[in-house]
Amino acid sequence: MNAEAKPFLKWAGGKGQLLSQLHEHLSVELFQQEFTYIEPFVGGGAMLFHMLRVFPNMKKVVINDINPHLITAYRVIKEQPFELIKWLASLEKEYYSLGEGERKNYYLNIRNFYNETSLDEIERTKYLLFLNHTCFNGLYRVNAEGKFNVPYGRYVKPTICNRETIIIDSELLNRTNVVILNGDYEQTVDYMGKGLNFFYFDPPYRPLNATSSFNTYAKGSFNDKEQIRLANFCKNLNRFSHVKWMLSNADCSAKNPDDTFLENIYADFNIRRVVASRAINANPAKRGKLTELLIKNYE
């Protein structure tokens, strides 16, 4: 079952196709002893579920994200998977019964309801998953008011209720002591365990150019000032001898050799490049291979 665990959401910048490369760059100490795994920007959770599958020696896992609806979804899948499956199956059946024009209206009505209505955790999560799997390109994007604004996607038979994934993900989230947080990433330092701690950071990427930015998965933006704050947070983690960390970000200098902003703010650390595929872009011609930075405080 563990081999089938995967993110229950599509997510811009998801690490599914990079997992083998990320795995190769993990600290060797993780294979030798128990440790606490901390992911301050959990997003779609590809790396999280990989770590839960591969490392039974994790004694605690701490995940965090600033997006409250995303974190609600993790809690629901951990604690109420079968209730969620029941409601998603009902939504899927109803959606499949509609014609194309009716489906678009159905989608827009749910999007409006999701944005404007106070919902309980199950309702919030079922509509989040519905919108994620039926919207254009599987994006999660909000406007300045924090409202989901992705247009309808024309899929013939999208999987709205992935029963197997929800059950397996729930089982993994319950196998280890998983702490689920919602807020600023800096709070995760308060949840470190005794002994070895390993942080994996996958923040909103610095845009490669002025038109490529996609970091509006929560209200507000992750600008250069925020990138510097994160770099300083990582530097401060080096005060602890029992902390290893790895961070992913865009390779801006590959696009513009003069743009060495990220290399400069992480100059004291080990910087490598990995090859990734860009799957989400409105222009198919702009999808494809590109390099990303992988920054570590260890060799």
Image (cartoon, rainbow, N blue to C red):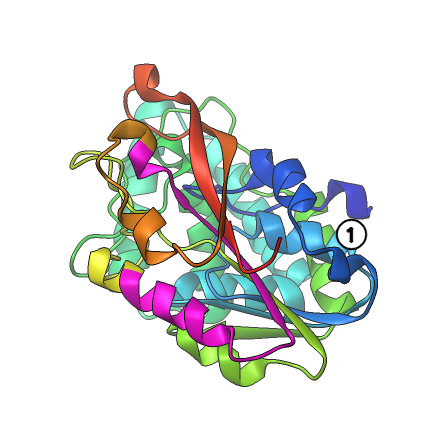
Residue 180 placement (x, y as % from top left):
56, 73
Q: Residue under label 1, please give it.
A: 54
Residue 154: name its quadrant. top left
Q: Is residue 223 left or right of residue 179?
A: left
Say above or below: 27 vs 75.
Answer: above
Q: What SS does tag 1 mark?
A: helix
Q: Is residue 136 left or right of residue 165?
A: left
Query: The magenta stretch spans which residues?
Result: 228-253
Q: Is residue 101 left or right of residue 45?
A: left
Residue 129 placement (x, y as % from top left):
48, 49
Residue 240: name its quadrant. bottom right
Q: Nearer the viewer, residue 10 or 116?
A: 10
Say above or below: 137 vs 202.
Answer: above
Say above or below: 62 vs 116.
Answer: below
Q: Residue furthest top?
A: 285
**Image point (26%, 57%), residue name:** 222
Q: Nearer the viewer, residue 15 or 293?
A: 293
Magenta span contains residue 229: yes
**Image point (28%, 41%), residue name:** 150
**Residue 220 visible, this orientation:** no
Say above or below: 117 vs 204.
Answer: below
Q: Nearer the viewer, residue 256 or 209?
A: 256
Magenta span contains residue 91: no
Residue 193 placement (x, y as % from top left):
66, 81
Residue 198: name its quadrant. bottom right
Q: Nearer the viewer, residue 33 or 203?
A: 33
Q: Residue furthest front?
A: 268
Residue 52 placement (x, y as % from top left):
72, 57
